[in-house]
Image: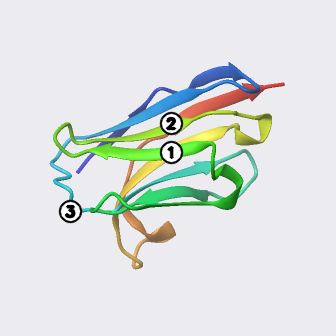
Amino acid sequence: VQLVETGGGSVQAGGSLRLSCAASGSIGGLYSMAWFRQAPEKEREGVGEIDHNGRTVYTDSVKGRFAISRDNTKNTLYLEMSSLNPEDSATYYCAAWKDSNYRWGFKYWGQGTQVTVSS
């Protein structure tokens, strides 16, 4: 499985962005998938996760502002971000196949897409 994120860019505080993550292979609803982010000189952190049933969990700092969804027919994962603030600036990564044997708990990773929020 290869993952490719798109949709990053620059936005002013209070704005919105939608990230997409296209999987080369079929995600078929079988994998848990997730979004992570990493700001310069900070640890990579989980933003949120969606399981094969579509259930989602989010880190506290994005609850109510971000929404994760998936379209298994298009093999695509989405991250809708609203009410963005400068602290959301980071490289955003999508991940698939939850497995504690791998770093950060997922086997497959995209290359990342940059999100910059200006005040």
Q: Secondary structure at mark 1?
A: strand
The label number, if any, that marks residue 90 in the structure image: none
Q: Is residue 117 left or right of residue 67?
A: right
Q: Are marks 1 and 2 in contact (CB under 8 Å)?
A: yes
Q: Are marks 3 and 1 in contact (CB under 8 Å)?
A: no
Picture coordinates of residue 71 (x, y %)?
A: 26, 42
The label number, if any, that marks residue 80 in the structure image: 2
Type of the residue with mark 2:
Glu
Q: Are marks 3 and 2 in contact (CB under 8 Å)?
A: no
Identify the residue at horizontal 21%, vertical 57% (top origin): 29
Q: CA distance from mark 1 to mark 2?
A: 5 Å
Q: Is residue 93 left or right of residue 21?
A: right
Type of the residue with mark 3:
Leu
Disc 1 or 2, which lies upstream in sequence? 1
Disc 3 or 1, which lies upstream in sequence? 3
Q: Secondary structure at mark 3?
A: loop
Identify the residue at horizontal 73%, vertical 27% (top origin): 14
Q: Is residue 110 left or right of residue 27?
A: right
Question: Residue lying farthest front?
Answer: 64
The residue indicated by pointer 3 is: 30
Disc 3 or 2, which lies upstream in sequence? 3
Q: Secondary structure at mark 2?
A: strand
The label number, if any, that marks residue 67 in the structure image: 1
Identify the residue at horizontal 68%, vertical 60% (top origin): 60
- Colour theme: rainbow
In the image, residue 105 sits, relative to residue 33, either above or below, namely below
Characterize the local packing of mark 2: few (<14), some (14-19) or many (20 or more) Cα atoms within 10 angstroms. some
Picture coordinates of residue 59 (x, y %)?
A: 62, 60
In the image, residue 112 sits, relative to residue 10, either above or below, namely below
Picture coordinates of residue 1 (x, y %)?
A: 23, 51
Characterize the local packing of mark 1: few (<14), some (14-19) or many (20 or more) Cα atoms within 10 angstroms. many
